Image (cartoon, rainbow, N blue to C red):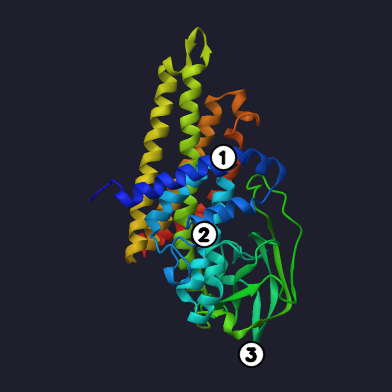
Amino acid sequence: MDFDFNEDQRAIQDMARAFAENEFAPHAEEWDRDHIFPEDALRLAAALGFAGIYIKEDVGGSALGRLDAAIIFEELSKGCTSTAAYLSIHNMASWMIDQFGHDDLRRKYGPKLASMEFFASYCLTEPGAGSDAASLRTKAVRDGDHYVLNGTKAFISGGGRSDVYVVMVRTGEAGPKGISTIVVEKDTPGLSFGAQERKMGWHSQPTSAVIFEDCRVPVENLVGAEGDGFKIAMKGLDGGRLNIGACSLGAAQTCLDLTIQYMAERKQFGKRLNEFQALQFRIADMATELEAARLLLHKAASKVDRQDMDATHFAAMAKRLATDTGFKVVNEALQLHGGYGYVSDYPIERFLRDVRVHQILEGSNEIMRLIIARNLLG
């Protein structure tokens, strides 16, 4: 067991950290305030290989592993958690096409996704199918060389802006075995979008319903075989859960660092805050819990890379711990900043608003507990 990064991973970490500091962090407040989707900054990230982290090199990907991705997303999230999270979703959708799509589909979309000429969205959640994803109702009916899609997807990151939508649809029986995955391009007739959601956080990425009304999609856009869609979606989520956990860790680490700096400067009752033992203990706990979550996340990433039998189990544990710990640490950082933590002149409140949703998406943390318990109890 080697807990140190190798030379390549340290170089990747340094590159991601420098990029986040130079290209994300200086603009994050503006993107959040004005609800700007930073396309140029995202394409700069793509130029470094961050839009196709684990898709194959023959279509422009970086062909890195899940641990590499966790390292990258923790660093990117320190600059702008919301934008890093969108990039995670783009990578998840792109990987699904690359991993399970036929070669023509890979070559059609892979290069444009890796360069972010095309932005991608992952479409699973529906108004009536959230945690119970296998009950989704969006239908795809075969009509010659097309599928005709009808239904609605909810809370889709990139909705209304993405060029490619990786959509889970019902092509067969009720339950998970009747679900398939298909790629829908933005200008397809019958595809439309709801109003942009007004959200607590994640302001730098658009979010809307994605609506299909007699939307005709070529059969060759099917990813994998009919009936494989739920398995493909869950495989995608194993990686997505790791990435969103890493985004929580990055935000929390930044807030912890800012709090340590603030406590060294702020004085009350004639002493600096870092001289009060009660506050020292809180910082110690924050750092310890953050490191524990990071270690579990990296172990889970290694298991997903190796395709271990218990990879999904560990991805669920890591996502649950990292996102809960991330929010807890950021919330503690805000408390230790007092009133300054609550105002937008300081970045703590933005990080808090951005990490809160990580406990809900990519499978809520209640569903993570369900996955873990089922694996343990049978």
Q: Is residue 218 above or below residue 282?
A: below
> Which circle's residue, 3 or 2, is located before the other in the chain?
2
Residue at 55 percent across and 66 percent down: it is 113
SS label for mark 1: helix
Q: Earlier in the sequence, mark 2 or mark 1?
A: 1
Label 3: which secondary element: loop
- Asked if residue 172 can be seen in this view, the reply is no
Q: Which amino acid does label 3 sit on?
A: Asp
Earlier along the polypeptide chain: callout 1 or callout 3? Answer: 1
Q: Name the residue under label 3.
A: 145
User: Residue 198: x, y in percent?
Assistant: 72, 49
Taking depth in this image into account, of 80 and 63 the one nearest to the observer is 63
Amino acid at circle 1: Ala
Towards the viewer: 220 or 338: 220
Residue 95 drawn at (x, y percent): 48, 67
From the viewer's perspective, is the residue at label 1 or at label 3 nearer? 1
